[in-house]
């Protein structure tokens, strides 16, 4: 699939002496996703001189010399990252839906978890400077916007912008420009925007979004289905305390209200306060407290307990970000160029898609580790296949753990 990338970037090679092609560069970046020792551009350069790597990736040269740092660095500015996005889309089309919670069958669209994350950049690049540390050192970064398909256990769409989260890089603007039909977008408070809600509905999709406490909702008694709804016993067990439908926003301000009926579901959850101050280490601060989440949605016929369950699954995109950064090594960027960052992100998405295709379940650290051992020669093909064929017992283990906590009174 990567072989078709080879012609890209060759138009400027009038002398015909290019030795590093797009498919080879992408293969090296992909290999680094499964090899913890390849944690920098210099490590990738060193690995490119190994005979086994050259044979594996088809980048053997007559001199068997490694690619120069200049060539690897220039590659990020020469090759088009959109071509890798096409490869990721082609792989995504081969994915089959994973086993899901049967309670989500009432949701008609594919659950798509939306969020963004900052990617810290080490090089001091003025275009990526976004803040300063307490010591006055400039901080740098890019923002990755991700749409994670819960049914496939893999990203559906990825975009890379500057760090600012404003203007063209605003997460709401990025999502609005990349909406698709037949989806149910699950979003956190940062996506709260009436025009985005209207755009989702106009695109033929649905949404579930946590909104801020100051949201205004005016039930219209003349419109059928609006007003307070009774909370069922099943909804109360899920923490739902209120269910109401009406017009959201300021009635006399078209630019600050939704143009469709909005349903608000109030859910009480127990949270442990966290110390988010510097040096706090994220440790619990004080006893747990009850907090009310306000979920806005256009799903008027779905039970309230299912709406609460849908938002609970939003944590799946956070787990993907953790896998993306900590396991695939994208906490460290190998390029300070925006196209280079996009290439690394698309390669990480492709690695995630490959693991999901091979294993038939969401990508996890154990499978990533086994594939890395196989590529490094520590595990043979039979051991890799045995791991991929092992039954997935994570749901059974989680259910047993939850039962134990209930038995202990928690």
Image (cartoon, grey):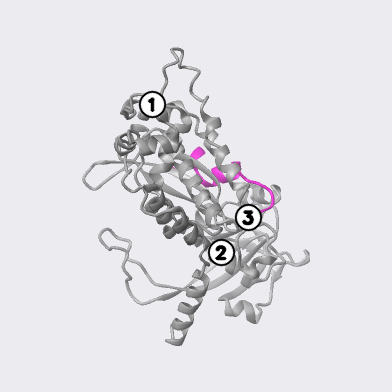
Q: Which residue is mark 2?
A: 311
Residue 143 among magenta residues: no
Q: Where are the magenta residues, as a range?
A: 163-184
- Where is residue 9 drawn, in percent x and y? 48, 23
Identify whether 55 is placed above or below 406: above
* Quadrant for the N terminus in the image: top right
Mark 3 or 2: in front is 3
Instruction: Tell me: 336 left or right of 404.
Output: left
Pointer 1 and pointer 2: residues touching (CB < 8 Å)? Answer: no
* Horizontal and vertical percent position of residue 68: 32, 27
Q: Position of residue 304 (x, y in %)?
A: 64, 71
From the image, tell me which residue sits under label 3.
96
Q: Which residue is mark 1?
A: 61
Q: CA distance from mark 1 to mark 3?
A: 39 Å
At x 67% / y 57%, what residue is drawn? Answer: 109
Badge 2 marks a residue whose secondary structure is helix
SS of the residue under disc 3: loop
82 horizontally vs 59: left or right? right
Q: Earlier in the sequence, mark 1 or mark 2?
A: 1
Q: Classify 10 Å Cα crowding around label 2: few (below 14), some (14-19), many (20 and above).
A: many
4, above or below 324, in the image: above
Is-magenta flag for residue 181? Answer: yes
Q: Nearer the viewer, residue 305 or 42?
A: 42
Of circles 1 and 3, the one toward us is: 1
Of the pair 191 and 113, the residue shown nearer to us = 113
Q: Residue at the location (42% across, 34% down)?
A: 340
Distance of label 1 from label 2 (alpha carbons): 52 Å
């Amino acid at each position: 699939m990567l072989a078709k990338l080879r012609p890209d970037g060759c138009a400027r090679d009038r002398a015909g002496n290019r030795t590093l092609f797009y498919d080879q560069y992408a293969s090296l970046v992909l290999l680094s996703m499964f090899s913890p020792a390849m944690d920098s551009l210099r490590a990738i350069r060193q690995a490119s001189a190994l005979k086994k790597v050259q044979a594996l990736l088809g980048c053997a040269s007559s001199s068997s010399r490694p690619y120069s740092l200049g060539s690897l660095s220039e590659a990020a500015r020469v090759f088009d990252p959109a071509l890798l996005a096409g490869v990721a889309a082609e792989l995504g089309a081969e994915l089959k839906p994973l086993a899901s919670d049967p309670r989500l069958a009432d949701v008609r669209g594919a659950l798509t978890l939306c969020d963004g994350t900052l990617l810290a950049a080490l090089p001091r690049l003025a275009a990526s400077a976004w803040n300063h540390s307490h010591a006055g050192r400039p901080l740098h970064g890019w923002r990755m916007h991700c749409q994670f398909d819960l049914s496939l256990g893999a990203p559906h769409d990825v975009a890379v912008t500057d760090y600012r989260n404003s203007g063209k890089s605003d997460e709401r603007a990025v999502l609005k420009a990349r909406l698709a039909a037949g989806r149910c977008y699950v979003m956190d408070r940062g996506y709260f925007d009436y025009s985005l809600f209207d755009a989702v509905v106009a695109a033929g999709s649905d949404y579930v979004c946590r909104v801020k406490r100051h949201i205004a909702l005016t039930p219209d008694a003349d419109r059928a289905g609006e007003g307070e709804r009774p909370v069922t016993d099943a909804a109360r067990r899920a923490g739902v305390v209120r269910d109401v439908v009406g017009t959201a926003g300021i009635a006399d301000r078209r630019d600050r209200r939704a143009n469709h009926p909005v349903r608000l579901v109030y859910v009480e959850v127990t949270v442990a306060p966290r110390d988010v101050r510097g040096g706090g280490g994220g440790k619990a601060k004080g006893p747990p407290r009850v907090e009310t989440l306000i979920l806005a949605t256009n799903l008027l016929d779905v039970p309230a307990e299912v709406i609460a369950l849908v938002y609970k699954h939003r944590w799946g995109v956070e787990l993907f970000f953790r896998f993306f950064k900590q396991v695939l090594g994208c906490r460290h960027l190998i390029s300070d160029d925006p196209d280079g960052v996009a290439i690394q992100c698309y390669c990480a998405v492709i690695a995630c898609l490959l693991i999901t295709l091979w294993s038939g379940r969401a990508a996890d650290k154990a499978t990533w580790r086994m594939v890395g051992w196989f590529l490094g020669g520590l595990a043979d093909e039979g051991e890799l296949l045995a791991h991929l064929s092992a039954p997935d017992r994570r749901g059974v283990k989680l259910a047993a753990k939850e039962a134990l906590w209930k038995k202990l009174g928690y």
